[in-house]
Amino acid sequence: MNNKFIIFDFDNTLADALALWIEAYNETAPRYGYKLVRPENYDELRTKSAWQIKNALGVKLWSMPLARRAIRKLFAARINQLQFAPGMREVLERLRGRGYRLAIFTSNRYKNVDAFLSRNGCRDWFEFIEPEASLFFKVW
């Protein structure tokens, strides 16, 4: 076995999660008076920092913990909809075939990552998952 680890992020690296996060955000947004994320805004929002996105969507600092909890709950309830990012399963299989050790460092919750990997029959490919390892602003 190779002694080299390759560490992956989960959301939008291993798993194609952006659409599911946006869906969960958009369902939660009206409750907090936030603006919706619409397809025509994607390109503009991609060029902004986390704080600029927060401001563009009308997100208030005081409401972020409650909104985050609600968004994460919706995301977790739909984890079975999540798919690998295009080509990522094949990349992982090749890396494993070459003896690399795999791990995940993610701002997502352990139960979500574990459920995704288990459903896709590849939980045992990863030696460890470091969950909820985010900076304050990563997934507010």
Image (cartoon, rainbow, N blue to C red):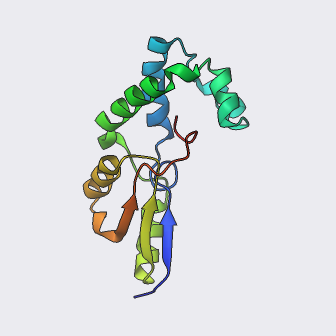
Residue 104 figure quarter: bottom left
- Residue in the image at 42% along x and 63% along y: 89
Using the image, determine if residue 9 lies above or below residue 109.
below
Is 47 situated left or right of 7 in this image? right
Is 91 situated left or right of 125 in this image? right
Q: Nearer the viewer, residue 128 or 97?
A: 128
Q: Nearer the viewer, residue 95 or 128?
A: 128
Is 4 situated left or right of 81 in this image? right
Q: Nearer the viewer, residue 111 or 45?
A: 111
Q: How many numbered marks are there?
A: 0
Residue 138 figure quarter: top right
- Residue in the image at 41% along x and 72% along y: 93
- Residue in the image at 62% along x and 20% along y: 57
Please state the horizontal and vertical placement of residue 20, each as a whole percent of the image: 43, 35
Q: Furthest residue to the bottom? A: 1
Please state the horizontal and vertical placement of residue 102, each as a whole percent of the image: 42, 71
Please state the horizontal and vertical placement of residue 62, each as a whole percent of the image: 53, 20
Using the image, determine if residue 60 lies above or below residue 52.
above
Using the image, determine if residue 33 lies above or below residue 65.
above
Q: Nearer the viewer, residue 105 or 126?
A: 105
Q: Quadrant of the N terminus?
A: bottom left
Is 103 situated left or right of 123 in this image? right
Q: Furthest residue to the front? A: 62
- Residue in the image at 55% along x and 16% along y: 34
Using the image, determine if residue 61 lies above or below residue 140.
above
